[in-house]
Image (cartoon, helix red, strand yellow):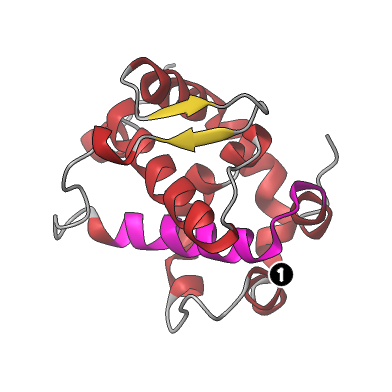
């Protein structure tokens, strides 16, 4: 028996929408770290942003909260992240492909990912999607403060 997916699942996992989640994440990371993001970090935001059960973990947080503090207050994230990423790989892959195809992000000479800020006009103003972009942006700021993929993956107990 096939699992039926709701309309909401299809809209939230739309490659264009997920590419904009990544855009928001990368943009915040670049602003905070003043550097381009390492490709493997693109695996992290989509499963965290789209998980409704994590919405409360983003309440009362801001740019200064920090990734370590957020993880410390929400230990279940660390224990569930591997499964979340594995279960979201199809959506993540499609979002990355879409983003590169549409020129939203590119690979620079160092092999890192950078965004083309002119490729996306206004995306943040929609009342329905704004909370998703906000969560993605917070993750980008927090990880940009660390600016070390190895440290970020270590904090999540993920090995590459």
User: Label 1 crowding class (10 Å Cα cut-off): few <14, some 14-19, many 20+?
Assistant: few
* Residue 102 x/y as whole percent: 31, 20
Foreground: 156 or 29?
29
Up the image or down, 25 lies above or below 94; here it is: below
Which image quadrant for residue 74? bottom right
In the image, taking residue 38 as reference, residue 54 lies left or right, namely left
* Residue 133 x/y as whole percent: 33, 55
Quarter of the image that includes the N terminus: top left
- Give the main secondary structure, helix, strand or loop, of the magenta stretch: helix
Foreground: 27 or 131?
27
Q: Is residue 1 one of those drawn in magenta?
A: no
Residue sitting at x 53%, y 63%? 32
* Residue 121 x/y as whole percent: 17, 42
Foreground: 56 or 68?
68
Mark 1 lies on residue: 75
Up the image or down, 25 lies above or below 120; here it is: below
Q: Which residue lies furthest to the bottom in this view?
A: 60
Up the image or down, 93 lies above or below 150; here it is: above
Residue sitting at x 74%, y 47%? 149
Up the image or down, 76 lies above or below 158; here it is: below
Residue sitting at x 35%, y 62%? 134
Badge 1 marks a residue whose secondary structure is helix
Q: Give the range drawn in magenta.
A: 131-150
Q: Is residue 145 one of those drawn in magenta?
A: yes
Quarter of the image that includes the C terminus: top right
Which image quadrant for residue 87? top right
């Amino acid at each position: 028996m096939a699992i039926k997916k709701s309309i909401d699942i299809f809209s939230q996992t739309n490659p264009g929408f997920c590419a904009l989640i990544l855009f928001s994440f990368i943009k915040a990371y670049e602003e905070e770290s003043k550097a381009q993001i390492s490709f493997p970090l693109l695996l992290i935001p989509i499963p965290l942003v789209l998980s409704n059960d994590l919405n409360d973990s983003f309440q009362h947080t801001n740019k200064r909260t920090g990734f370590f503090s957020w993880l410390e207050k929400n230990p279940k994230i660390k224990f569930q992240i591997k499964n979340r990423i594995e279960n979201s790989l199809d959506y993540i892959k499609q979002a990355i492909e879409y983003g590169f195809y549409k020129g939203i992000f590119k690979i620079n000479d160092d092999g890192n990912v950078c965004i083309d800020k002119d490729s996306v006009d206004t995306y943040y103003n929609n009342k329905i999607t704004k909370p998703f972009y906000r969560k993605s942006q917070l993750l980008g700021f927090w990880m940009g403060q660390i600016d070390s993929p190895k440290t970020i993956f270590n904090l999540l107990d993920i090995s590459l």
